[in-house]
């Protein structure tokens, strides 16, 4: 089913607002919990999602020294989430330790480990940003690829990348490497702060496994109708 490929972010500030959104779109299987909601209500929101038999993308984008990210990943794995993020720029040692930690955390509670996936480069950044502000000498697509390869070499399950880089990452990293794409914007939706976007069908054709689609659905006048339009587009691929 195409709806299995859609992850909707719970980018709201309270548990009540999150529950209202979940209730509004009961057909959604995958929900993303990011920094705002997790800081607001902690792991309680994860328990609510699991009680409703939802799949969870815990998008906290860990970025710290190896021991710190390992500790955080070990705890996060004990929540029984399905996907978990860490910045590839934390470095090889941190990525390796984080992967080991999710295995340990899940094993301690007898659950399957989450798939640990690396953030290659944020979709709000442009080529100019990385060249002039971050002083990265590589072209943006090449940099995203190098970060994905670092994650793969460190034992991670996949990466987060913009849909504009996904075709190259799929070709180089292979079919078993999970690729999650935010920055998805249907042709009828506003781009917002996403600088490197594609439509849902373009992203799937390019090789994305999962599409993170937020405001085109959640900010729509009729979120259910917006979701149906996206699913219809994907069905036509």
Image (cartoon, helix red, strand yellow):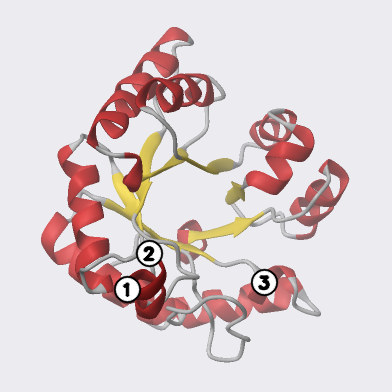
Task: Please state the total of marks drawn on the protein image.
Answer: 3
Q: Secondary structure at mark 2?
A: loop
Residue behind mark 3: 215
Residue 227 image point, x, y percent: 63, 72
In the rendered image, the residue lying farthest to the top is: 108
Q: In the rendered view, would you say 159 is above or below 169?
A: above
Residue behind mark 2: 134
Q: In the rendered view, would you say 38 is above or below 27?
A: above
Image quadrant holding the C terminus, namely bottom left
Residue behind mark 1: 131
Q: Secondary structure at mark 1?
A: helix
Badge nearest the viewer, 1 or 3: 1
Badge nearest the viewer, 3 or 2: 2
For image coordinates 60% across by 91% down, the residue present is: 188
Location of residue 155 (image quadrant): top left
| Left or right placement of residue 179 versus residue 52 in this view | left
Residue 52 in sight = yes
Lower sequence index among marks 3 and 2: 2
In the rendered image, the residue lying farthest to the right is: 16
Residue 218 image point, x, y percent: 72, 68
Q: Nearer the viewer, residue 141 or 109?
A: 141
For image coordinates 47% across by 37% down, the residue present is: 82
Label 2: few (<14), some (14–19) or many (≥20) C-alpha neighbours in 10 Å? few
Q: Nearer the viewer, residue 200 or 162?
A: 162
Q: Are marks 2 and 1 in contact (CB under 8 Å)?
A: yes
């Amino acid at each position: 089913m195409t709806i299995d490929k859609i992850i909707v972010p719970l980018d709201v500030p309270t548990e009540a607002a999150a529950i209202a959104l979940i209730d509004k779109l009961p057909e959604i299987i995958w929900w993303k919990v990011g920094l705002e909601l997790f800081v607001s209500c902690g792991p309680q929101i994860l328990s609510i999602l699991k009680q409703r038999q939802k799949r969870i993308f815990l998008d906290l984008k860990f970025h710290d020294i190896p021991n710190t990210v390992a500790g955080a990943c070990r705890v996060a794995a004990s929540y029984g989430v399905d996907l978990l993020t860490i910045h590839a720029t934390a470095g090889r040692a941190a990525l390796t330790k984080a992967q080991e930690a999710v295995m340990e955390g899940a094993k301690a509670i007898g659950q399957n480990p989450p798939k640990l996936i690396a953030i290659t480069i944020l979709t709000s950044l442009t080529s100019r940003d990385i060249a002039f502000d971050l002083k990265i000498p590589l072209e943006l697509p090449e940099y995203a690829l190098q970060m994905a390869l670092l994650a793969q070499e460190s034992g991670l399950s996949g990466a987060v990348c913009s849909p504009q880089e996904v075709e190259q990452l799929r070709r180089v990293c292979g079919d078993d490497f999970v690729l999650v794409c935010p920055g998805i914007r249907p042709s009828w939706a506003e781009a917002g702060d996403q600088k490197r976007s594609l439509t849902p069908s373009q992203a799937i054709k390019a090789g994305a496994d999962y599409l993170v689609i937020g405001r085109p659905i959640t900010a729509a006048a009729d979120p259910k109708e917006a979701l149906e339009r996206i699913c219809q587009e994907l069905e036509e691929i």
